[in-house]
Image (cartoon, rainbow, N blue to C red):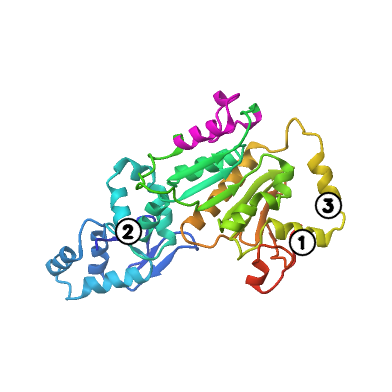
Amino acid sequence: MHPRVKPALRRGWRDLDTVQFGMTPAHALTLGPMDRATQGFLDLLDGTRGLPLLREEARLRDLPDGHVDGLVRGLAGAGLLDDARGGGPDADALRGRGEVLERLGPDLAALSLLTPEPGEAMRLLAARRRARVRVRGAGRVGAVLAALLSGAGVGSVEVEDEGRVEPGDVAPGGLPAEAVGEPRREAARRAVRAAAPDRPPSREQGPEPGLTLVVLAPRDDVGVYAPDPAAAEPLIASGVPHLYVGVVEATGTVGPFVLPGETACAGCLQQSRLDADPTWPRLLAQWRSGRRRPALPCDLALAATVAGLAATHALNFLDGHTPPACGTRWEISAPALQWRARPVAAHPECGCGAARETGSVREGAT
């Protein structure tokens, strides 16, 4: 182990023997009392020395036997310590790509704040390179989201869409203006490759790895507001986690994040709406059969906001957490611009089986 005090946390002294790591309430931690010798020793925990060399440094400073090991255990227990050489073989391979790691340095620093175990942040960052994510939809939300995931180190980001790029699809960080008229799928794939810090790691010969996650980001506003359960039936059947995201009538939505058989899906959402409003099927049929409008209300700033939150949920899942959008649709509408969490119930009449898993039914979303 090569101990390193997490550099992502700023350090400040509250008094002569009390140190505060971090500024924000979410991550700040205060330690003390701390004697002067230990204070000076903190600067040696920079990842360049292993424990044997640190113990030798401690002897040169007349620190008692076991002092270094106790300090390292204490800092590690508080979630303040990283291991500059930890994370396993994939992490070692990533360290060997200096330019790539420089690109991903801010992402690694952010992960270090969320992972108390030394070396875990590097392991997670390296694991992202093995993930395979598919984004369905290459509009103002989907293309930006796909580029964000690629730029954050996800090794394989695929984009599916039809038709050709229209002027209204162009967005900073997504499809560029020079792509107008080109096939959406090809233009989005170029945007993904341009955002990637490097080429994805080579995979051994054999069958293509299964999808880790699918993000459904339709350009159709009805598809955003009322996602078609049939479109996700293959994902439910094969157990592929998926996330719904988009913008409809100046309202951004993220969720639900579906863990098949465990959390509510698009079918649950549809059943809950039908329970709450008997006219729902009539309205939905009219919306789906209505004439296509020349421009949908999806301004750039809101689209970027939604893409960013959706990418955060996706990365949260890839890093091993349960995203807050499970069983929830997050919504934000102009001009209030306040995120609202709308529960999505696991419905007993939906064939996804989530209601049996949860054993309870909550109030559905609208």
Q: Please give the count of numbered marks on the rendered protein.
A: 3
The part of the image, by quadrant, that contains residue 144 is top right
Q: Residue at x 41, y 48 (%)?
A: 106
Query: Where does the image place residue 267, in percent across and percent down from the top left?
Result: 71, 57
Quadrant where the C terminus sits is: bottom right
The span from disc 3 to disc 2 (Cα, nearest Å) is 52 Å
Q: Earlier in the sequence, mark 3 or mark 1?
A: 1
The answer to whether residue 124 is left or right of residue 264 is left
Callout 2: helix, strand or loop?
loop
Q: Earlier in the sequence, mark 3 or mark 2?
A: 2
Q: Residue at x 62, y 37 (%)?
A: 140
Say the numbered circle drawn on residue 272.
1
Q: Which residues are magenta?
A: 168-193
Say the numbered circle drawn on residue 87.
2
Residue type at the position of mark 3:
Pro
Q: Depth-wise, is mark 3 or mark 2 nearer the camera?
A: 3
Say the numbered circle drawn on residue 281.
3
Callout 1: helix, strand or loop?
helix
Q: Are marks 3 and 2 in contact (CB under 8 Å)?
A: no
Quadrant where the N terminus sits is: bottom left
The span from disc 2 to disc 1 (Cα, nearest Å) is 44 Å
Disc 1 residue crowd, few under 14, some 14–19, many 20+, Cα 10 Å: many
- From this view, report whether residue 265 is shown above or below residue 250: below
The part of the image, by quadrant, that contains residue 171 is top right
Residue type at the position of mark 1:
Ser
